Amino acid sequence: MAEKSATETRDTLIIIPTYNEADNIVKIIPHLLRLEEPVDVLVVDDGSPDGTAAAVRQLQEKHGDRIHMIERSGKLGLGTAYVTGFNYALERSYQYICEMDADFSHDPEDVPRLIREVKQGNCDVAIGSRYINGISIINWPLSRLILSYTANLYARVITGLPVRDTTAGFKCIARKVLEKIDLNKIRSNGYSFQIEVHFRAYKAGFTLKEISIIFRERTEGVSKMSKKIVIEAVWMVWILKIRSIFGVL
């Protein structure tokens, strides 16, 4: 297995939750490892029956300690996958923690831009935003685009978040943010998880900055969007707002 160079310092971890992403994961991880910004990758796999975990293990044989994996027993949800990854990063020496999807809807080439914004002190959370520069989404049906845009507007109005893309799942977070917000109190498990992370970081006094990206609909695999996820997001923004008002966030 490849060994870490004595002079090489990798202080950034990219967390990728997976469920049935075998075809995508074998492409995106090598791409990430070739970036100018040195990163490690953590895959949190929810018992994918398509062999995603086995594909990651094969990559580990080649790339050694740059690729990490946590295998879970089944579909436990996006939010718990990221919290598991956050705790993994905090238990180690990572200073910058990134979130991204496995399906190339987030361009790996945008990762260094997000990391640099945080490293240079321009913000504490750099968000890859689909809405900060108009609407930057490719190949979504109009119905999903309207749902996403109105959901983000709704969340922004209710929570007061100074963020246009409140549900963005592509970001870089400084370690100090995760150390300050109580990960054990996070209750969201769908896309509202992203709203909750942004809201907790904002209320804790950290700086959020949106960086314009182009979001592309996946070409392989199946979207994880569901009615349950949408309903959770509708109610969660009110729960966060009310808890914030009463100081029990």
Image (tube, rainbow, N blue to C red):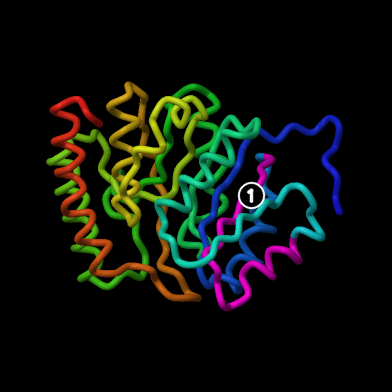
Query: Relative to residue 191, is residue 183 drawn left or right?
Result: right
| Residue 172, image x, y percentages | 48, 39
Query: Relative to residue 61, is residue 45 drawn left or right?
Result: left
Using the image, determine if residue 212 lies above or below residue 77. above
Locate the N terminus and report the quarter of the image it occupies: bottom right
Label 1: which secondary element:
strand
Which residue is the site of mark 1? 41
Q: Residues within 10 Å of mark 1 (few under 14, many from 20)?
A: many
Name which quarter of the figure residue 123 lies in: top left
Query: Relative to residue 166, is residue 11 drawn left or right?
Result: right
| Residue 7, image x, y percentages | 83, 30
Q: Is residue 146 magenta?
A: no
Q: Amino acid at mark 1?
A: Val
Query: Relative to residue 153, is residue 35 drawn left or right?
Result: right
Name which quarter of the figure residue 122 lies in: top left
Judge by depth and name the residue closer to the eye, 246 or 139: 246
Q: Which residues are magenta?
A: 38-59
Which residue does the image show at 40% across and 58% down from the upper left? 215
Using the image, determine if residue 73 lies above or below residue 240. below
| Residue 194, image x, y percentages | 34, 47
Locate the C terminus and report the quarter of the image it occupies: top left
Which residue does the image show at 32% across and 21% down from the upper left? 205
Which residue does the image show at 65% across and 30% down from the upper left? 93
Count of labels in the image: 1
Q: Is residue 54 magenta?
A: yes
